[in-house]
Amino acid sequence: MPLSTKGISHQIISSLITFKVENLGTINDCKIVINHLIRKFSEPLEKEGLQKKYISKLVIDQSKAIKEHLFPVNEIMNHLLAMPLTENKDVLANTVHAYLENALILVYVTKDEDNQLNKFGFQRNMPTEYSDPKSPLYGDVWARYKCSNLFSNIIE
């Protein structure tokens, strides 16, 4: 039986509570579980037709394209780890669910474009401009594509 987005959201909260509240396991234990669950969330999201997708206009064959997350999974994981756990589990799981539905956007790129992201150091992280309130790219989920000169290639 496949996993559900609701169930995955609850599992993420359980992992966070186990580590942060109950002080069981290590940060690495928690990160590995959450990383896996974030990636698994995409499967039922896609199956339900709810996953947003973009593609580079340079991609000729989507089956050979590199599937990237618009917002790196590492950044999503760090956001979840920083969440305050002050609400009950259902409220927290609903918060995680809503966040992941909006954050797990896929972008199909060519191998060269993927290498370009890596060259700029954006494989796992957002550029510093994303977190700088003085930058025009502050809070812009497309910041790593804009900083690596790939944004103009992307279409919905």
Image (cartoon, helix red, strand yellow):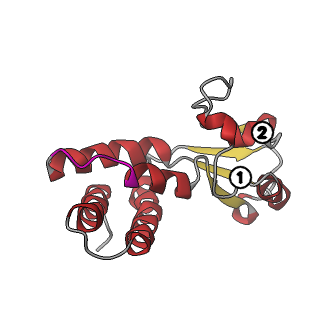
- What amino acid is at disc 1? Phe
Q: Which residue is mark 2?
A: 147
Q: What is the count of numbered marks? A: 2
Residue 130 screen position, x and y as percent: 63, 36
Pointer 1 residue: 122
Whether residue 101 can be seen here: yes
Q: Secondary structure at mark 1?
A: loop
Q: Is residue 59 above or below residue 66?
A: above
Q: Foreground: 154 or 82?
A: 82
The residues colored magenta run 81-87
N-terminal of the two: label 1 or label 2? 1
Residue kind at label 2, given as amino acid type: Cys
Q: Is residue 33 left or right of residue 94?
A: right
What's the CA distance linking mark 1 and mark 2? 9 Å
Against 84, is 132 above or below? Answer: above
Residue 30: % across, % down? 37, 69
Taking the spot 30% from the left edge, 56% from the top edge, the residue there is: 9
In the picture provided, is 27 more to the left or to the right than 103?
left
Quadrant of image for the N terminus:
bottom left
Name the residue rendered at 32%, 70% in the picture: 2
Query: Up-down: is 42 above or below 29?
Result: above
Residue 142 appearing in the image: no
